[in-house]
Each structure stands twice: as C-alpha cells, then as structure tokens.
Amino acid sequence: MSNALIAEQVLNGVQSGVVLFLMAAGLTLVFGVMGLINLAHGSLFMVGAFAAAVTAATTGSFVLGLVAALAAAAAAGALIEVLILRRLYQRDHLDQVLATFALILIFSEGVRWAFGSFPLFLDIPSALSGTLMLPGDIPYSRYRLTLIGIGLAVAAALYLLVAHTRLGVRVRAGEDDREMIAALGVNIDRLYTTVFALGAALAGLAGALVGAIQSVQVGMGEPVLILAFVVIVIGGIGSIRGAFVGALLVGLTDTLGRLFLPALFALFMDGPAAASAGSALSSMSIYLLMVAVLIVRPTGLFGSRT
Amino acid sequence: MNPRIATLAAALAMAATATSTALMAAPLKVGMITTLSGGGAGLGIDVRDGFLLAVEQSGNPDIEVVIEDDQRKPEIAVQLADKMIQSEKVDVLTGIIFSNLAMAVVPSATARGTFYLSPNAGPSALAGRGCHADYFNVAWQNDALHEAAGAYATSEGFRNSFILAPNYPAGKDALTGYQRLFEGELAGEVYTQLGQTDYAAELAQIRASDADSVFFFLPGGMGISFLKQYANSGIGLPLVGPAFSFDQGILQAVGEAALGVRNTSQWNKDLDNETNAAFVQSFEAAYGRLPSLYASQGFDTANLLLSAMAVADVSDRDAFREALKAADFDSTRGDFAFGSNHHPIQDIHVREVVKEGDVFTNRTLGLSLSDHGDVYAADCEL
C-alpha cells in the first residue's frame, strides 16, 4: 500500500467529510436554534440537485446551476418553514419526525411527478474536469479539490456569520434561551425562517455539487441525511464546530475504513472472503465510531453538558 | 308446456351457457412486484412498461396485472408477495429486479404453489440446487453476461483486471462469472456497498494497482456515479462490463463518459429479427423513449406467459408448466429456449456505446458466447 494511495484516500476522506459538513451544518443549526428535528433535509438536498441539473441543461452554465440550487433550496425551505414547520416548534420531537417524514414523501413524489423517475444529467464544468498533480506525484481530481475548497470556505463563512454578525448573535442567543430573546424584541418568526432557509440553501448547494459526480435521482438525499444525523450526534447538537469536526471524522473513517479493513482481513483470510468481510465491516465503521463517541461523551464532542 | 316452467328452463339454460363460457375463458391474475422508486427505479419501470406493452398488444382480455412497488427493500417485497398470494390470490408472480429481493420472495412463493417468472434477477442459488419446477427465468442466469465479459476481455488480450461489484448476491455472481471465463490475473477485487454513490476510495485503489483493465457491475444509479467519477479520475484504463451499467436508462445521465465502452448483453435494439424491430418501434411510440434490455425482458416475460395461457389453463398446473417450459413464443432475441433448470440458453453479444444523433445508445459489435447455458444446471434436480 503506497504512500500515494494513503494520501489520496485521506484527501478523499476530507472531501467526503466537507460535503457532509454542508448537510450537517444546516441540520444542526435548525436543531440547535429551533429544537426541530427535520427529516426533510435530505429532500432539500435533492431539490438543489434537480434545480442545478435543469438549470445547467437549459443554460449550459454550471455556475448558474449552483445559483439556482441555492435559490430553489432556500425557497423550498422558507416555504415549508412558514407553512408547516412553524406549527411544530412547541411540539414533541416525535410529532416533528412524523410531519417531516411526510414532507419527504411529498417532495419525492412531487419531484418524480415533475421530472420522471429516470436520473437526470448533470456534469462538472470542463474547466474543473481532469486531474491536478499534487506534490508527491499524486494525481487528484480537480473537481474534488474544488469541493474541498468550497466546503472550507463555507465553514469559514459560517464561523464569521455566527461569531461576528448580528444575525449570529441572535442565533447563539436563540440557542441558549428562546423566550428571552423574544422578550427582548427580536422577531423570532423572521429569525427562524432565515436560519431554516440558510440551512436549506447549504443542503441544496451540497446536492448540486455532489449531483455532478453522482446520480441526480429521486431519493438521493436520504442516505446523506442518515450520515448527516450521525455527524451531528457525534459532533454535538447545535454546534457548528462539532458538525465540522464530526463530518471530517465520519468522512475519514468511512474512506480509510474501506481501504484498510479489507486489507486487514486479507492478512488471515483469502481474497474474495476478505473483500466481502472487509466491505461489510467498513459499512458499519461509521456507526461504531458514533457508539464509541457516545460512550465517552454522551452529548457529542462539542455538545452542551446539560 | 307451462309458460312459467318454460321461462324458468330458458333462464337456467342461459345461466348454464353463461357459466360454461366463463369457465372456458379462464382469467389469469399476475402479480408484479418490482422496483419503481429509489435508486433502481429505472429498471423496474422498464420491465413494467415492456410487460404491459406486450399484454396490451395481445388484446387478451383474460389477463389481469396487479403492480406494486418494492422500493428495493426485501422486507417490503416479502410483505407484497404475501399480500398478492393470500389476498389478491394471484396465479403467477413476476417483476423482481434485484437478486437479494428475489432470494427473499421466490423460494417461499414457489413453495406455496405460485408460478414465478423472473424478468430480471437470476441468482445462482435458484439456478442450481435451489431450482424449482414452478420457477422460470426469462432473462438470464446472473453469471451469463459477466461470463461473456470475461470471455471478451480475454479475447481482447487483457491480462490483469481490477474487478468490482456491490456486496449482494448478484454482485458476487458477477465477479465469479467474470473470473470463470477470464483467463488473466486479478489486480484487485473489491465489494462496494449496495447503493453506494461515492467511489473515490475504489478509484484510488484502481489507480494504485497495476491493472490493465477494469471490470465492474454497478446497475442503475451506482453505475452512473461510478462512470462519471471514473471519467474524471484520469485513470483511462479500458472498461468492460455487463449491459446493466450501460443500459438505455443510464446512458443519457452519464453522457460522454461512457462512449466507446464495450459491454455484453443478450439483447440490443439492433438485433435483426422481426419481433425485435416491431418491439422497438412500438415501445418508442408508446412511451417516447428507446427500450432498454430490461424492457425487452419484461416484454418477453409477458409473451411467454401469454403463449402458455393460449395452450393451457393455469388451474391445470402440470399442463401450464409444460406450456411454460415449451417457450413457444416470438422473443425479441430471436430463438428462445429454456435449459433443464428453466433458465435460458441463448447468445450473448458484445456492444459498444455510441452516440446516434442526440441520443447515447448501444451498437452490436458481435457475438461473445453462443447458445450459452449456465454451470448451475448440473446441480439442479429438474
């Protein structure tokens, strides 16, 4: 196993983590500030991917597709927040799960009704295709490097937003004590809609970016949603820093697990059996990581201690 | 005769005639459990559309089709099968796309006395010792297209292949099938997860190995993701695969990344026989898209069923079984015959992905395996 392979896999793990962060950041913000479990987050991911695919196909521009993804996902998010989710904040988490699960079904059938069941075409722009030679003679996909860059930029921007802007102050205060900031005159409704739309936009961006190298189809958001929940549980609910660290941990564990576990089994099992067993165990590795973190820190790595 | 008695006699006579007419045209209920949502939806939709097209073209009023979506989940497929057998009381079950669902449903369905015609999944477990007199596979045994790929790779001079497939029964069949007729070495053998969308890790391993070719089996959305990422990775090794990763439904979503790839299939839209030409034309007219091999399989399954219905009544199970075995119908593949284990013996062709106008499709290059059966027939007791 060469150093180049390990280095490439580490980069892959970081890239996969960064994309997960885009999903998890929105999810943890919504859960932290509004106390809402939103299962429809994966559908917003799908809406972003479809918006990008359709826009890129009609205009021929990937960047316009990304803009459309942000706009469509934010709009969809704001819409469902105002119409439905607003009534759920005071209710039990289970009610929220039921309602947002229904939203998943509505979004899936709606997208299928509008676009059909076959996958749509979305491709990376030719400027970003091909590989770049990294130091150490490692050819790495230019597009994936761009993804890492965009993810880190979004993380930095979110940090600046939360730590250094008025909106960020209100978000942090709202996470702490909702009733108090309402009493202090902050428009809670508008704050919540803004936060939700922001989280939705991030999910839509993730969907568009990932859709270019994967398949844009109905149901593409649900597997990512499950991983995003694992990330926020590991990182701690409501903590964006936790989402970032958790996402990187999950991405690296998944990618490096797929590399090392079959190799580990190959030490004492023969070829096909080792590949099969290694594959099975590596698919569990993320959840084992979650269990390990929860045993040591029940509220997650950066979660509140209450 | 007393007028009232005459009327009564006439009424009874009419009733008797009506009943006997009903008995002569025996209705047959078909339950189709297929994947209509999620990552594998394109396959199930094609099978369903092909099947329904054949039923509609036959104009046969005695066949009733009930369709349900298994969402690619084995537990849902099992529930649907139970519902169809117990409450809908279907005579024939069909439709399952994925081999793990087939393994969950077929053995118990045939054990309960329902015929099963598979338009797609052909796990090796059901072709060998697990074969059953009431189970017929109209498409292929899973290994077939992969064996043809292995034979083709050998004929092209590839010596060191990197092979990958998802970790489920059809994936395992794919890799064993390829290795059976491939005479080179394996640079690597990887099982991915069913539904996996990111192949960066696997691509890095391919790059780091000394392979001269890549064989992969990744149906549906998985294939789209892999092909796009492969094209973008700069690895550039020749790709070989079965038709499942290069079918009509996938190619439009992949685009240029698939051009030139060789793939093996038992069917292509340019196969030269009357039934196929009529099928392709009518499918396009009815649904506005070109058929894939899944659609041709659904079409053939329906025609097999209709041919058996023309000769025997489903309530006479032995006669119906013999009629199914005879396979006396016009197939889109030309001649069609079952082997002893009720799996097809057929030609497998090599195709190349090309662009015709605006549409990406396949062009048949030649024959890879002719009159090919499967190795599991020897273990089947039928």
Image (tube, helix red, strand yellow):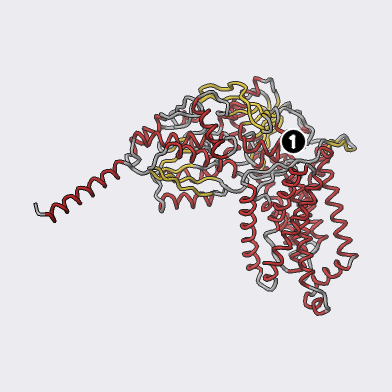
Q: Identify which amino acid the numbered label 1 is placed on.
A: Tyr
Q: Which residue is disc 1 drawn over?
A: B230
What residue is drawn where x is 89% and y is 66%?
Answer: A165
Residue B261 image position (x, y, % from top left): 68, 28
Q: Report whether residue B297 is seen.
A: yes
Asked whether, in this view, residue B171 is left or right of residue A67, the answer is left
Residue A89, placed above or below residue A65: below
What residue is drawn where x is 41% and y is 53%?
Answer: B87
Q: Nearer the viewer, residue A69 or B234?
A: A69
- Hey, which quadrant is residue A241 in on the image? bottom right
In the rendered image, the quadrant that contains the N terminus of chain A is top right
Q: Report whether residue A291 is seen.
A: no
Asked whether, in this view, residue B127 is left or right of residue A124, the answer is left
Asked whether, in this view, residue A266 is left or right of residue B290, the answer is right
Residue B291 image position (x, y, % from top left): 57, 35
- Hey, which quadrant is residue B178 in on the image? top right
In the rendered image, the quadrant that contains the C terminus of chain A is bottom right
Q: Nearer the viewer, residue B52 or B230?
A: B52
Please tell me whether mark 1 sits on a helix, a strand or a loop: helix
Residue A67, placed above or below residue B282: below
Name the outermost residue toward the left. B1
Q: Nearer the viewer, residue A71 or A251?
A: A71
- Hey, which quadrant is residue B4 in on the image? bottom left
Dot 1 falls on which chain?
B
Asked whether, in this view, residue A8 is left or right of residue B91, the answer is right
